[in-house]
Image (cartoon, rainbow, N blue to C red):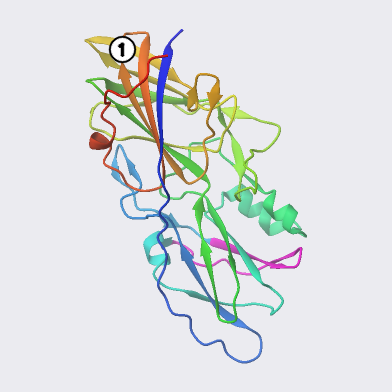
Amino acid sequence: MKKLVFSLFVCGFILAGCKNEPVVAPDGDRQIVVFFSAPSVSASLLKATGDVDETISKVILFGVDGTAVVAIDDPILEDTDLEDALDAGTVITLSKRIKTLYAIANPSDDLETYLETASILTLTDLLALTDDFSDEPDPSNLLMSGKGTVTDKSAKIDLLRAVAKVVIVGLNEFDITSVQVMNTPDNGYVFEQETFSIPDPLSTTDYDEVEFTDPDDEKIFYVAESELPGTEFVVTGSFNGKEATYTIKTLNKGATFYNLVRNRCYTVGLSPLTEDEVLVTIEITDWIPVEVDEQYIPDDNFVEP
């Protein structure tokens, strides 16, 4: 059995907002300007193939009138670069009774079809929506969601990505040659839950193994939120001229497991001690770009079990 040693760091959050001025709402049926913000867009999505431009395929809005949910008829921001979507507001017309807006960005085809045909009558129904993660999420078109309060003239909605980002880093001359994501949930809630949870009953899937020929390639993966028994990362690489494979459970430290939470970045540094034992360091941050080669060099503070 492979032994894992963990050092855990937790960093603060950074949220990049929009700086736009709303237009004056006309008389009669209330018009407002909807603005969006999202955590650190630029350079935040690196993959082995290089930079990835994050896009918005569409945003579907729902207004909340008390506990009733009203669908806003037409999707907005269709086929828009995410950075462009954050640069300008979108004018919509709302009933004056609607005080809160909920947004779903980049729904899957199945979710979009469901939203077009289903009768979502209450806020409870809306917050219970799930989407499919049986295929590895597309980093250029990640599911996002959020809500915002409606004022007389505007509403600002903070979008959170509905997946966790996991970065695998080989340290101390451990050259990673392949990673496979296994036992990861194949569905997840569209909206962040008031108390962290994942859909029940739990159903999991394995993603295809990803091979790397260049040790400098970024090993970045996107997965649905998960808790026990935890997503696994099977990592194979070269150590002291020999092949070594380690199975990394979802952030477990002894008997304690840490959840994989949406819109967080988990950077996992692997430093082999032997062919059967690996030292694992973990840093959890909000979804921001980091220089992993400098950020995750082991020091003398790691504690042996």
Left or right of 4 on screen, residue 214: left
Residue 296 in the image: state x and y as whole percent.
29, 32
Regarding residue 138, the answer to whether it shows in the image is yes
Regarding residue 209, the answer to whether it shows in the image is no
Residue 126 in the image: state x and y as whole percent.
69, 55
- Up/down of 207 relative to 255, above or below: below
Point out the stretch of residues depicted in magenta. 59-79
Does the magenta portion include 217? no
Which image quarter is the C terminus in? Answer: top left
Q: Residue at x 35, y 53 (%)?
A: 53
Left or right of 177 on screen, residue 110: right
Residue 161 in the image: state x and y as whole percent.
49, 49
Local crowd size for mark 1, using a 10 Å CA cut-off: few (<14), some (14–19), many (≥20): few
**For numbered disc 1, what is the local secondary structure?**
loop
- Identify which amino acid the numbered label 1 is placed on: Leu
* Residue labelled with disc 1: 273
Does the magenta portion include 72? yes
Asked which quadrant contains residue 67, the reply is bottom right
Residue 16 in the image: state x and y as whole percent.
40, 60
Left or right of 138 on screen, residue 116: right
Q: Residue at x 31, y 15 (%)?
A: 272
